[in-house]
Amino acid sequence: MEFTPDGPMAIPMWVNGHAFLTVTPDFFTVTNPATGEGLRRVPLCGADEAAEAVKAAQAAQPAWAMMGVPARRVCLERLAQGLDRYTGHFAKLLIQECGFDEARATAEVGEAVAALRGTQVGQTGVLGIVLDASRPLAAFAETMAPALMAGATLVVKPSPKAPSAVFALCELTAREEWPAGVVNLLQGDAAAIEGLCASTVDRLLYCGNAALGEQVGAMAAAAGKSFDMKAL
């Protein structure tokens, strides 16, 4: 994803440290909620693509955990610095896809930077994260940072309505020379979530609107997957 004012017209997955191109039968058109303008497209992925992303996270997890907390904290600080440098770019993506005004979008970027610099340590393992479109960037940072500090690796499934800022943060990990596979991104909607539930992730975490969270929780329960929800 180029860090340019206009951004890309197509957003792929992010797997094992690089953009992961996949051909799916259907795509979702990302639109500006204020104007209805079609901005970008994302593939509607399913179980096969989920398995690829989880495989990358599992392969990366032992080495990431062995790095130790101080080294992982350095990685997160470098990512926070990079995000701060690109505040204007990330804010523009949030304005385009979430309908935020400039002040709110800029504030969300700041919240994400602060979250990446947090000291909370979560649980290790391989984590699947599902987000809605209400606070895509800040919610991602707030969810990922404690897990990464603990030595977890992850697969994030952003809302197809607001995927760009989340994708850009994943790409920024590569620019900041993070190990490949620590952070992966799966595009899609319900089929992608079902794919994550059917995969070998250790647990699934949802962050967003409570009503949608209940639906995600039901999918996780049906698959016998450990599930946690943070309602916004």
Image (spheres, helix red, strand yellow):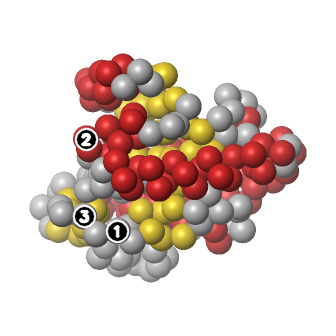
Q: Between residues 120 and 53, which one lies in front from this camera angle? A: 53
Q: On residue 164, which mark appears? A: none
- Residue at 12%, 61% in the rendered image: 36
Identify the residue under disc 3: 24
- Label 3 close to label 1 by CB (< 8 Å): yes
Residue type highlighted by circle 3: Thr
Q: Quadrant of the C terminus?
A: top left
Give the side of residue 93 with respect to residue 96, left or right. Answer: right
Mark 2–mark 3 Cα distance, whole angstroms, equals 14 Å
Mark 2 or mark 3: whose residue is earlier in sequence = 3
Q: Crowding at label 3, few (<14), some or many (≥20) Cα neighbours within 10 Å? A: few
Q: Crowding at label 1, few (<14), some or many (≥20) Cα neighbours within 10 Å? A: few
Q: Quadrant of the N terminus?
A: bottom left
Q: Between residues 47 and 122, which one lies in front from this camera angle? A: 47
| Figure quadrant of residue 130 | top left
Give the side of residue 146 with respect to residue 37, left or right. Answer: right
Above or below for 20 versus 197:
below
Identify the residue under disc 1: 22
Whole-percent x and y of residue 48?
36, 53
| Figure quadrant of residue 223 | top left
Mark 2–mark 1 Cα distance, whole angstroms, equals 17 Å
Above or below for 191 versus 59:
above
Identify the residue under disc 2: 190
Mark 3–mark 1 Cα distance, whole angstroms, equals 6 Å
